Image (spheres, helix red, strand yellow):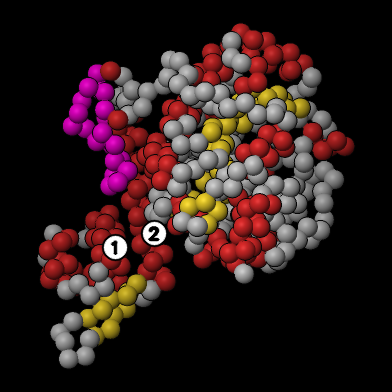
Amino acid sequence: MNNNNEDYINLKILKELSKEPSISQRLLSEKLGTSLGKLNNCIKRLQEDNFIKYEAFKNENKVLYKLTSSGKQKKQELALKLINKKIKEYDELIEDEKINVNKKNISKTSNIKFGIGHNSVKEKELVTENKTRTKPLFKTIAINLKRRTVIVDDVLSTHKGVPIPSWIELSIIDVCNRSCSFCPKSDPKIAPDTYQKMQMNLINKLTNELKEINYKGSVVLCGYGEPMLHKDVNLISKKLSEASFVEVVTNGDTLNPNKIKELYMNNVNKLLISMYDGEHQRKKFQKMIQESKVPKDFVILRDRWYDEKKDYGLKLTNRTGTIKIGDQEEVGKYKKCFYPSYQFLIDWNGDIFLCPQDWQRRVTMGNMMQEHIFEIWTNKIMSKYRKNLINGNRINSPCTLCNAEGTVLGKNHANAWAHIYR
């Protein structure tokens, strides 16, 4: 049997059995469109591999199937594998045929679909970049901590009776054009450039789910790479702006007046430029901003050109044990942490991590292409980390290696969660 076909059948079997544990093999074979003999062989192999178990009903010719913990994990792995395969095929088709999905001759085609399942999108629904801004600019204090405090701590939103995040970081591309000594990207053994990028079907799904929970916070394009290297950064920003405030954090190397204006027109709320080379960059970017004719408070310039003695102009952390440079706080000094109470990070492939400090990327909270973000936000593993950190117990990896203070923001969220966990 072809491996891809076998993966697809196994995924369908696991999905159907998780939804309807008492389904008969005959009915299941009809649903999957496969022969009863082939289905029986597949189920036997899944049992042998300890992905499913079954229990026979007494006095009835029926069995009750149950996915093991390994089976649930296998179902997620197979789904993600097939999604990535479809995305790769889509990208190859676009490249091979030299197709520009934003051109008018494509957008008139109504019978082409991209993506799979609930993530499929008709061509007429594909977004195009704005020519003028369609959303008012949210004005905040142009100081990083105060700016974040306004968004994170001023409003505590809930969904189904529990606090929802107010800050989400998006790593839309896994590559950076710089190699800063205080960043894990400087060590390819820790954070290699993989050149993987987030696809629009994930952005569409995230936007829809943020709308469903009535999200009131910010989505920040930053994460593990340089967001301005993603060719669809304007489209991503425009789509996300339907459900949230949007911020872009960049080293500014790819910027020019037109690109700054395009970000503004596509409803980016704040553009934060980290200047690493020296004081001279301030005049350079101020000139760009003036020529772009965007509001002055749209762009925040951040000094990052200082040396190790001044911590490079930022609050240094060890990024969960991956960075040792500079005058670092001792691991264990800080016990409590509110990060998982008010935020999380989404990697290019939909993997969700506790916070942007976690550069090891070994412990995922879930994958948003497999589950609703609210289900991941409230699941057992996220709750375990959140509860432990609220109570000052940094006992789980990667938190055991982290020296970040973690209580500067999110106190209101942490208090609300603490009340729930009583």
Is residue 120 highlighted in magenta?
yes
Q: Residue at x 79, y 34 (%)?
A: 312
- Residue 17 in sight in this render: yes
Residue identified by numbered label 1: 15
Name the disc covering residue 76, or none. Answer: 2
Q: What residue range appears in magenta?
A: 105-124
Q: Is residue 79 above or below residue 169?
A: below
Task: Locate residue 202: give its quadrant.
Answer: top left
Q: Is residue 130 above or below residue 330?
A: above
Q: Residue at x 79, y 19 (%)?
A: 279
Q: Residue at x 32, y 78 (%)?
A: 53
Q: Is residue 91 above or below residue 294?
A: below
The front one of 373 and 287 is 373
- Give the structural element (helix, strand or loop) at label 1: helix
Q: Position of residue 320 (x, y in %)?
A: 69, 53
Q: Amino acid at mark 1?
A: Lys
- Give the structural element (helix, strand or loop) at label 2: helix
- Residue 170 in sight in this render: no
The front one of 407 and 11 is 407
